[in-house]
Image (cartoon, rainbow, N blue to C red):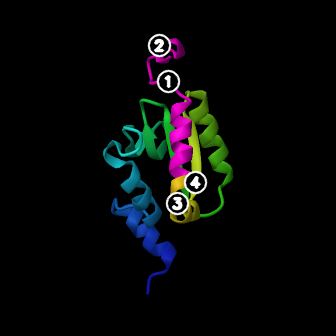
Amino acid sequence: MATSFQKNKQHQKDGRGTPAEAALWEQLQKKKLDGLKFLRQYTFGPYVLDYYCADKLLAIRLDGAETSDGDDKRTSYLGERGITELHFNNKQIFEGTKDVLAAISAAAAKTPPRGKSSEEKA
């Protein structure tokens, strides 16, 4: 019998993602959150971003458990390129979806649309 970890790895390999990824994608796809267009499994440099909103230079990362040392390098790499990365764990997705969506919405609201200055936004 396959373990939960093995099932999650299989979901990632076949493109379905983990249950937490599917749950968040349901809320982000088709511009459901504030009209923002998110891409799923977007390759940026050496990294694959779980979700990415190019207009707001906003990346979202879902973690099953603890974060690793490599996450700091990834966050720095993205930050050097103007991308804000938000981290959420699976528990937050399942138990606090409204809070997660509010945090994403707030982060997006802080950034003017790509290619427009803050004066143009006002």
Which span is picked out in magenta?
100-122
Look at the numbered disc 4 and give the secondary structure of its residue. strand
Q: What is the x, y in percent for residue 106?
A: 55, 38
Residue 108 % position (x, y): 51, 35
Dot 2 corresponds to which residue?
120
- Say which residue appears at 39% left-offset and 60% top-offset: 22
Residue 102: in magenta span: yes
Mark 2–mark 1 distance (CA, rounded to whole Å): 9 Å
Which quadrant is home to the N terminus?
Answer: bottom left
Lower sequence index among marks 3 and 1: 3
Amino acid carrying mark 3 in the image:
Ile
Residue position for label 1: 112
Decide: marks 2, 1 in contact (CB < 8 A)?
Answer: yes
- Looking at the picture, how far across and down is residue 21, in whole percent? 44, 58
Q: Which residue is mark 3?
A: 93
Disc 1 to disc 4, how far (Cα)? 23 Å
Q: Residue placed at 44% from the left, 64% from the top?
A: 18
Q: How many marks?
A: 4
Identify the residue at image location x=54%, y=63%.
90
Seen as rendered, the residue at the extreme front is: 122
The residues tagged by marks 2 and 3 sit, at their Cα atoms, a distance apart of 34 Å
Please indicate whether residue 52 sits to the left or right of residue 75 in the image: left
Instruction: Residue type at mark 4: give it.
Output: Phe
* Mark 4 lies on residue: 88
* Mark 1 surroundings: few (<14), some (14-19) or many (≥20) residues within 10 A: some
Position above or below: 87 against 89: above
Q: Nearer the viewer, residue 77 or 107?
A: 107
Quick one: SS at disc 2? Answer: helix
- Left-right relation of 72 to 103: right
Residue 63 lies within the magenta run: no
